[in-house]
Image (cartoon, rainbow, N blue to C red):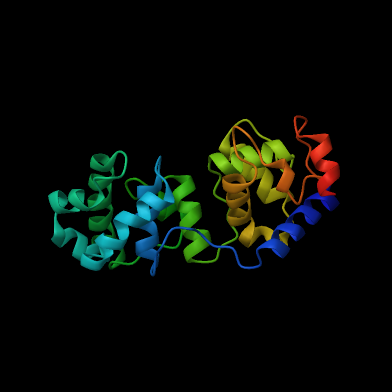
Amino acid sequence: MNREKRAEIFSRLRQSNPEPTTELVYQTPFELLIAVILSAQATDVGVNKATTVLYQVANTPESIIALGLRKLKSYIKTIGLYNTKAENIMKTCRILVKEHNGEVPRTREELERLPGVGRKTANVVLNTAFGEPTIAVDTHIFRVSNRVGIAKGKTPLEVEKGLLKFVPEEFKKDAHHWLILHGRYVCTARKPHCERCFIIDLCEFKEKSVKKAKEVV
């Protein structure tokens, strides 16, 4: 895919959604960090249901430590892998208090040293909380990038590097949100909704419906 095509794709995504953001509900970088840790192998809807109640009781590293592991688990038990996630959250809170004065660090290296935080989670926090032009590659973004042809790769890291290389600078800050939302609601895994895709004429997916493409264009 050439540069002009990529620019047009993101131009249309921006036109459709000028101010995209995460569907996770949060008020502070710390609340976002905890929500993203919880979101692994879970839906944003499920995470929001749990954190809406949790954050009324504890929404800082100090208050979660005071809450204790058992009570923390009771608030997030509806979320998959909640036992492991609760333990990671407690460890992360202790590190934040001890090493960062209770604040969420703003570098990838420091974020990735927190239990339960990998490259994808770090990218989400850097992008969404701090406005960095990072792109977190989850299953949706991996699929859309490969399927449409924006940035192809066999691993999430390969796709991330491709996106950072090929996405025009003016679109990088919001690219993560546009791609994840497009993958979640339009370019879905089992049956993409080509009939209502506004970038279908630019898409390189071989299995898309040509008839539907002509109807949209």
Asked whether residue 68 is in view, the answer is yes
Task: Decide if residue 21 is on the left or right side of residue 26.
Answer: right
Image height of 130 relative to 118, above or below: below
Query: Where does residue 121 sit, x and y in percent of width and height?
Result: 45, 50
- Residue at x 67% of width, y 47% of height: 163
Task: Decide if residue 130 is on the left or right side of residue 48.
Answer: right
- Residue at x 20% of width, y 48% of height: 73
Q: Nearer the viewer, residue 124 or 44?
A: 44
Q: Quadrant of the N terminus?
A: top right
Image height of 98 relative to 113, above or below: below
Task: Decide if residue 1 is on the left or right side of residue 97.
Answer: right
- Residue at x 41% of width, y 49% of height: 112
Asked whether residue 113 is in view, the answer is no
Q: Nearer the viewer, residue 200 or 122?
A: 200
Residue 41 figure quarter: top left
Q: Nearer the viewer, residue 20 or 194?
A: 194
- Residue at x 30% of width, y 55% of height: 50
Query: Where does residue 180 sit, x and y in percent of width and height?
Result: 58, 49
Query: Where does residue 30 sit, x and y in percent of width and height?
Result: 35, 63
What count of labels does the image hold? 0
Image height of 91 relative to 155, above or below: below
